[in-house]
Amino acid sequence: MDRILGRYGEPIYAILRIVVGLFFACHGAQKVFGAFGGPGGNGQPLPLTSFFGVGGLIELITGLLILAGLFASWAAFIASGEMAVAYFMAHFPKGFWPIVNGGELAAVYAFLFLYIAARGSGIWSLDQALGRGTRAEARDPVAGR
């Protein structure tokens, strides 16, 4: 596959960062604004002073930053931590395996965000547009490898 998809690694990573950031921001918008039917399906936002309201703010803000590629490493690190906390507080007490305890999404988000935190904003990002560089460019300034 490297011969076929290898040359598209950077754009594929950018699409991954953008899509995951958008989906995460949607989770936050659901909690903060009651968008997409709201967290309970009733279209009502959660109180911002509640535990889940604060989580929604984190999801909305970090999701938008990751989507835009602005401070994506920091935002993804915070989002990864939030998802790890969510997993261990809400899902792990129901059982060890994510498939059993309903925590697959939280676990996948935690590891995706950890990868984004390590990788940086990449191409098609505000960090790149502002000349802030990316972690990949720091390794190889010629090709971003």
Image (tube, grey):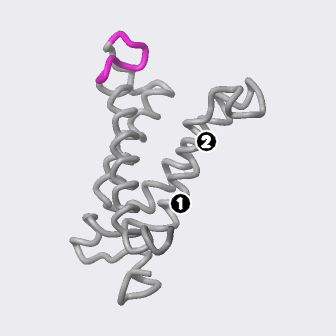
Q: Residues within 10 Å of mark 1 (few under 14, many from 20)?
A: some
Q: Outermost residue, left direction?
A: 129
Q: Say left or right for 2 vs 125.
A: right
Quadrant of the image occupied by residue 32: top left
Task: Look at the image and give the residue range highlighted in magenta.
Answer: 34-42
Q: CA distance from mark 1 to mark 2?
A: 13 Å
Q: Mark 1 is on which residue type?
A: Tyr
Which residue is drawn at the image coordinates 58% and 51% (left, top)? Answer: 111
Task: Please provide percent x and percent y for residue 68.
Answer: 28, 56
Quick one: 113 or 16, which is closer to the camera?
Answer: 16
Q: Secondary structure at mark 2?
A: helix
Depicted 26 relative to depicted 31: above or below: below
Kindly report the secondary structure that dominates the magenta region of the rendered protein.
loop
x and y percentages locating residue 93 in the rendered image? 74, 27
Q: Which residue is mark 2?
A: 107
Q: Between 36 and 75, which is closer to the camera in this rendering? A: 36
Residue type, mark 2 in image:
Ala
8 to 76, vertically: above or below: below
Residue at 39% from the left image edge and 81% from the top image edge: 144
Q: Are marks 1 and 2 in contact (CB under 8 Å)?
A: no
Q: Residue furthest top?
A: 42
Q: Is residue 98 shown above or below 139?
A: above
The residue labelled by disc 1 is: 115
